[in-house]
Amino acid sequence: MASIEITNARKSYGAVDVLHGINLDIQDGEFIVLVGPSGCGKSTLLRMIAGLEDITSGDISIGGTVINDLQPKDRDIAMVFQSYALYPHMSVAENMSYALTLRKTAKEKVASAIENVAGVLGLNALLERRPKALSGGQRQRVAMGRAIVRQPQAFLFDEPLSNLDARLREQMRTEIRKLHRRLGATSVYVTHDQIEAMTMADRIVAMYNGIVQQVGTPLEIYDRPANIFVASFIGSPAMNFLEGIYQAEGDKAAITLEDGTVIPVLPSPQAENGQHITLGARPEHIDIVQDGSRPAVSSNVELIEPMGLSTLVHVTLAGKPVKIFTLARPDLAIGSQVQIAFNMDKTHIFDRQSEQRLLPLNEPRHTQQT
């Protein structure tokens, strides 16, 4: 396996710039997930690594070798596609061994490789079947097996689970992660699903409009998002956002919302009194307060979604929708008023113009990775 280094990589189609100077170091054996909405450039970047798209400028290296001008077959990578891309007239064993056959690998080595990989993926009983006789999950295992038998320097996954149903996606996420730990393979995985990114990645690369917005471990990005895009894209249910004015005095600070509601926050050395900001709070960091034990603000209950283990309560505050995630089963009526309290240590403030997160006093600057 090998590391991958991307240096100021740009991609343009005529006058249209798609990727704007991507810089990224992927360590040997690391599982990196590129995540972002459709059109953000994540699949384009993956295809540039694979050699399926030309690089307009910049460099991409695998194992210390610049691969800009190498053909895909010479890059020693294996790619797993969304569509599986299996040959319908070939058996599972033939699909998995096809690349080795093209290399004129000895039959004994091919048979041994197929047997080993089939055992790892649970495909031993399916080796003689054709793709049409397989389920979606089985086809995806075959596609991964075909990549694994090649023993490449790096694996590239282009939204491989998007064609599967929710339960099977959950199962395959676990299997891919276990497989990665077993193989120790350098892997780059593309998805628009933030749950896949959070559960699978060693590090997440959040992308938007052809720019890397933030790089970090799943919990770093979840707990300390660099900007409003990252904060809103990562996390389910999504983060709540409210607009207001920042005011600080001494070691205390608060946000005054448009209707005059005041919400205490941690002071930030990057914010100024009177600055227009966006307040961000994840649903699990807002509590329903029924005993008056904490300072709280009044809101109106709009909807209650019981989910078994938890409950999602929708309220309005300052005319804006706010979601509250609780493990309790509150006895609330739609249309009633409820007191809610924000967890000050977990609440974020963002500059409304730049949309960058403003760091609180207790957080050093280096923790915000971009």
Image (cartoon, rainbow, N blue to C red):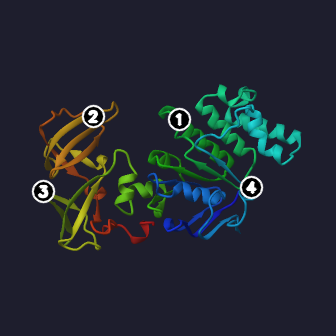
- Label 2 close to label 4 by CB (< 8 Å): no
Q: Earlier in the sequence, mark 1 or mark 4?
A: 4
- Label 2 close to label 3 by CB (< 8 Å): no
Q: Earlier in the sequence, mark 2 or mark 1?
A: 1
Tell me where residue 260 appears, x and y as whole percent.
Answer: 10, 59
What residue lies at 28% left-to-right and 57% top-to-bottom? 280
Compared to residue 130, the image places residue 200 above or below, namely below
Secondary structure type for disc 4: helix
Residue in front for this viewpoint, 220 or 353: 353
Report, in whole angstroms, how far the alpha carbon at label 1 lies from the one at label 4. Answer: 29 Å
Position of 130 with respect to 342 (left or right) is right
Residue type (three-letter) at the residue carrying disc 2: Glu
Q: Earlier in the sequence, mark 1 or mark 3?
A: 1
Question: Which of the 4 image quadrants contains residue 279?
Answer: bottom left
Question: Which of the 4 image quadrants contains residue 359?
Answer: bottom left
Q: Earlier in the sequence, mark 2 or mark 4?
A: 4
Tell me where residue 115 appears, x and y as whole percent.
Answer: 78, 35
Q: Which mark is residue 73?
A: 4
Residue type (three-letter) at the residue carrying disc 1: Leu
Few, some or many residues within 10 Å of mark 4 (<14, 14–19, 20+) = few
Report, in whole angstroms, how far the alpha carbon at label 2 lies from the one at label 3. Answer: 26 Å
What residue lies at 65% left-to-right and 41% top-to-bottom? 85
Q: Which residue is mark 2?
A: 305
What residue lies at 71% left-to-right and 42% top-to-bottom? 146
Q: Earlier in the sequence, mark 3 or mark 4?
A: 4
Few, some or many residues within 10 Å of mark 1 (<14, 14–19, 20+) = some
- Label 2 close to label 1 by CB (< 8 Å): no
Q: Which mark is residue 261?
A: 3
- Label 1 close to label 4 by CB (< 8 Å): no
Q: Which mark is residue 164?
A: 1
Residue type (three-letter) at the residue carrying disc 3: Thr
